[in-house]
Image (cartoon, grey):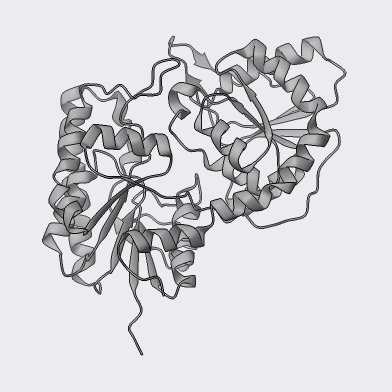
Amino acid sequence: MAERRRVLIAEEAIRDHSGHWAAYNCTIAAAFEALGWEATVAGSRELAPGLAAAGVRPVFSESRWDTKYDTLPPTRRRLWTLRHNLRLAADMDRFLRAAPPFDLVFAGNVTLAHVTGWWRVICRHPDKVRRLALMFVQDAGSYPPGGSEPVFPPQARLLRLSIRLLRPLVREGRVILSAETEAARHQYERLTGLPFHLLPHPVALPELPSLREDPPLLVAPGFARYEKGSDLLQSAWMQFRREHPDTPARLLLQWGGDFTLPSGEVETFRLAGLPDVSCLRDALDEPALAALLQRASGVVMPYRRSSYYSRLSRVVIEAMQAGLPVLHSADTWLESAVRAHGAGLSIPAEDPRALANSLHLFINKLPVLRLDAAARAKLARDAYSPGAFAGELARLCGIHAD
């Protein structure tokens, strides 16, 4: 009997069930297991008991996301980046010494703080890491209003040089570079001159019966942040209520804490006290999110184009798989995804007045939009199938997915 293929899914940010780190990477592991592979997930050394019991291995001593990296002065940021790459390589050295060989190692959220670390890993351990797949989900550049070509800041040069260290390994087929959206793939190919592959973001939302509430509940899952337009949504809801006080609808926002606007002002939860608005302060694991979407009639996502022109939102995929319509920003990845696999309405980005008007229209059209979204839910489940992700990744690596 042939030996099972082995895959290692590595993510230093896996510590507990907050965010999507654990769900995303464990979903990938389950998809490879379904293909007959032996899958191992490596996370933080500070694992929550439930994740440790589920078999996640405690490997990484530090996460890029544990520090306020973007607020560091430039010199300290460069030094921290160098140190973190060295620490990642050292953590993997210790793990791989006692581990079996892996046919594939996958890292799903790679930044400048990781690239040379992974380069050191595959160069030092060619017998333990036969192929390495790196996914880049953070923007390396930005997009001017109305523009579709990325503009790269001076600091992107260091990222370019770091990724180009991998060029010989890419040519040999030992390293696979990837992105989650077509715009992101194009952005990184422009930056590096190397081929990047498109991989579908794997989501396996359970198919649950709708428990839709009345009056309709609109939800904005994901902790409030500036790039998600949470400040715009608050302003728009207040205006919507002034103009349409009797329209039956409720709003639920996930608000983990206040955030700072570019002006320096702090955006607080301004809708407190309104009878038709509720606030969820806690993180949602996958079962809790699925239960919330069961109750909802629609999802509201006024994300800023400057952040989401090329960037994917997992919440949109989950909403489409749940058969929910999405009110989303125009000229973003969200719009292209909903057009292809869901239903909803688009709004001009960063326009509270237009968002207030669109909220009223969205609520009035919910009966039709819900039918359209439900009919297209299978499209979203198929397009973002974990099995399709695992099979495509194995194919790109030149490995037959048994």
Q: Residue at position x 79%, y 42% from top?
A: 371
As drawn, 129 above or below 365:
below
Q: Position of residue 68 (x, y in %)?
A: 33, 30
Q: Position of residue 73 (x, y in %)?
A: 22, 22
Q: Which residue lies at the image location 40% right of the left edge and 23% below the top edge? A: 148
Res 288 seen here:
no
Picture quadrant where residue 96 is located:
bottom left
User: Visible in this render: residue 290?
Assistant: yes
Quadrant of the image containing the N terminus: bottom left
User: 111 above or below 353?
Assistant: below
Task: Say whether residue 145 is left or right of residue 11.
Answer: right
Q: Nearer the viewer, residue 328 or 352?
A: 328
Residue in the picture at 42% in, 38% down: 182
90 horizontally vs 142: left or right: left
Q: Quadrant of residue 229?
A: top right
Location of the C terminus (image quadrant): bottom left
- Left or right of 41, for residue 365: right
Q: Residue most toward the bottom?
A: 1
Q: Is residue 144 left or right of residue 80?
A: right
Q: Position of residue 83 (x, y in %)?
A: 16, 41
Q: Could you say where residue 367 lies in the image, as x and y percent from the top left?
A: 83, 35
Quarter of the view holding residue 29: bottom left
Q: How many marks?
A: 0
Viewer-nearest residue: 33 or 186: 186
What residue lies at 41% left-to-right and 57% top-to-bottom? 47
The one of 181 and 257 positioned closer to us in this rendering: 181
Does 397 sit above or below residue 217? below
